[in-house]
Image (cartoon, rainbow, N blue to C red):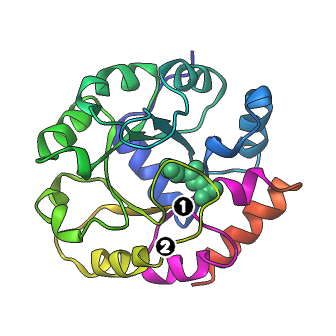
Amino acid sequence: MVRPFCRDETLARLRAGAPAVLPSLLACDFANIEREVRAVEALGVSALHLDIMDGHFVPNLSFGLPVVEAVRRISQLPLDVHLMIDNPGDYLERFRAAGADTLTIHVEVASDPRPLLDRIRSLGAVAGLALNPPTPLSAIEASLPHCDIVLVMSVMPGFGGQRFDRRALEKTRALKMNPNCNALLEIDGGVTVETISECAEAGTDLFVAGTSVFHTADYAAAIGQLHSLAAAQ
Ligand code: DX5
Ligand code: ZN
């Protein structure tokens, strides 16, 4: 069993790797998940992004604990677990035990996310808070000191391959300027060679990329090009 990382270690790796392209396994070939994980791991990515969907918070189902646990067994990388579920508080301990290194919850399902974020930290994981495109930054302002990562959604969550929503850029810029925000800034949805430069310019540290990595013939070229564009800003 590959051991999970502690919070400081995960944060240090993510900070050192930034700007970092994090492949989202949602777009990988699940019939060959081990091969897919090893392929991107060999390219030196900083972490893997895993999308958990419950069919309630988002209108789609993806995968859950057994897949996180299976990926943990075959990968040395930090696992960035994005919980698109209605009741994250019921599952934090189980996802951490399965091998999650970061746990990101959505503000839309938590009237006060602070106790949940603190619980994630107390489990030794990195605490992330996500907000959907229509959700204003004011919804997370009070929680910023409790966040290690702010995940700015640039699509409505639920599906890969959607068009980038530019409202994410404005939010990222504002977070970058906010003295109360020391979190890493992550963007998720529609990140491609057309959109990544603007995301980087706005201040994004971590770029989730599903379709623009796994639906290409050459992952090395795809990640290399995305990374160079992000690093050029
Ligand atoms: C969307 C997920 C994303 C998804 C992104 O609900 O949170 O992580 O994998 O996919 P692309 O990169 O294809 O937009
Ligand atoms: Zn995601």
Q: Is residue 209 visible?
A: no
165 versus 186 height, above or below: below
Q: Is residue 92 visible?
A: yes
- Horizontal side of 229 relative to 77 (left or right) equals right
- Horizontal side of 217 relative to 12 (left or right) equals right
Q: Residue at x 26, y 35 (%)?
A: 120
Q: Amino acid at mark 1?
A: Gly
Answer few, some or many: residues within 10 Å of disc 1's Cα (few below 14, many 20 plus, some between 14 and 19): many
117 versus 233 height, above or below: above
Disc 1 residue lies near ligand 1 with CB under 8 A? yes
Residue 138's x, y, as percent? 16, 69
Q: Quadrant of residue 124?
A: top left
The residue to which callout 2 is attached is 165
Q: Residue at x 25, y 51 (%)?
A: 108
As drawn, the label of residue 189 is 1
Tell me the SS state at disc 1: loop
Q: Earlier in the sequence, mark 1 or mark 2?
A: 2
Residue 78's x, y, as percent? 52, 39
Residue 132's x, y, as percent? 36, 60
User: Disc 1 vs disc 2: Cβ atoms closer than 8 Å?
Assistant: yes
47 versus 223 height, above or below: above
Q: Is the C terminus in the top left, top right, bottom left or bottom right quadrant? A: bottom right
Q: Is residue 201 magenta?
A: yes
Tell me the SS state at disc 2: loop
Q: Residue at x 23, y 30 (%)?
A: 89
Answer few, some or many: residues within 10 Å of disc 2's Cα (few below 14, many 20 plus, some between 14 and 19): some
Question: Which one is in front, 179 or 26?
Answer: 26
Q: Which residues are magenta?
A: 189-215
Q: Amino acid at mark 2?
A: Asp
As drawn, the label of residue 224 is none
